Amino acid sequence: MAENMKKISVIVNVVLLVAVAALYVVVLSNGRTHSEEEKKPGMRETSDHGIVYINTDSLIINYEFARKLSEDLLRREESSRTDFNSRARVFQEDMMEFQRKLQNNGFLSLERAQSEERRLRQKEVELQELNTRLSNELMRQQDMMNQQLRDTITNFLSEFSEKRSYRMVISNTMGDNILYAEPVYDITKDVVEILNKRYRAAGN
C-alpha cells in the first residue's frame, strides 16, 4: 500500500499536467467584443493569425484553484495511507506474536494454532482488499479533480479567446510544443491573473 500510495502521489501531478495540457488546442471563431477585465494597455490583442500559447506548467503552479485541488487530493492520500499503515502495523504485530507462540509452543493445541493462522490469513486478504479499495478511490477522486479543472479552464478559455479574438490557444508544456515564439504571444500571465481573480471573487 505504501508503495502504491507513493506512486499515486507522483502520478497525481503528472496526470494533472497531462490532462490539462490536452485542453489547450482550442479553435474558435473571431469575437468582436473586449471586456475591460481582459484588456491591458499596450498589449497586442491577438497574434497576426489569432494564435497564442499558454505555458501549462506555469498555469498549474500558479492557478490557485489547481493548487487547492492538488492539496485536497494529497490530504486524502495521506489520510488513506495513515489508515492503511495503522491496520498493517496491527497485522504485523499479530503475525510476530503468532510466530513467537509457534516457536515457543505457546498454543494449547494444534487446532488453536490452525485457527489463529486462518484468522491471520483472512486479515491479510482484508488488508489487500483495503489497499485496492483505497487506491481505486484515490484514482476516482483524481479523475473527478482533473475533470473539474478541465471544465473550469476550457470554459474560461472559450470566453476569454472570444473576447480577445484568439482563434487558437496552444499549450506549451516544458517547451515541448513550441520551439520558439515571441513573448508577446505568451498569455499565461494574463490567464493566471484573471482565473485567480475570479477564484477569489467566488469566496475562495
Image (cartoon, helix red, strand yellow):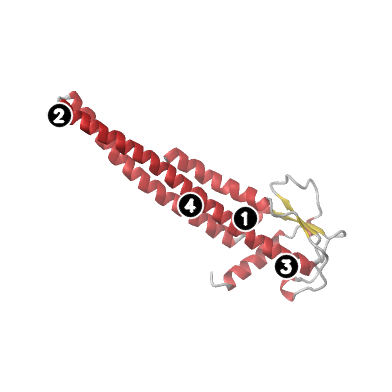
Q: Amino acid at mark 2?
A: Phe
Q: Is residue 81 above or below residue 107?
A: below
Q: Tell me the tag on residue 74.
A: 4
Give the residue number, with chain letter if any, for mark 3: 159
Q: Position of residue 185 (x, y in %)?
A: 79, 58
Badge 3 marks a residue whose secondary structure is helix
Disc with the residue nearer the chain's start (1 vs 2):
1
Label 4 – label 1 distance at C-alpha: 15 Å
Q: Residue at x 50, y 44 (%)?
A: 8
Disc with the residue nearer the chain's start (2 vs 4):
4
Badge 1 marks a residue whose secondary structure is helix
Q: Amino acid at mark 1?
A: Ile
Give the residue number, with chain letter if any, for mark 2: 107
Q: Is residue 25 left or right of residue 128?
A: right
Disc with the residue nearer the chain's start (4 vs 1):
1
Whether pointer 4 and pointer 1 mark residues with C-beta atoms closer than 8 Å, the reply is no
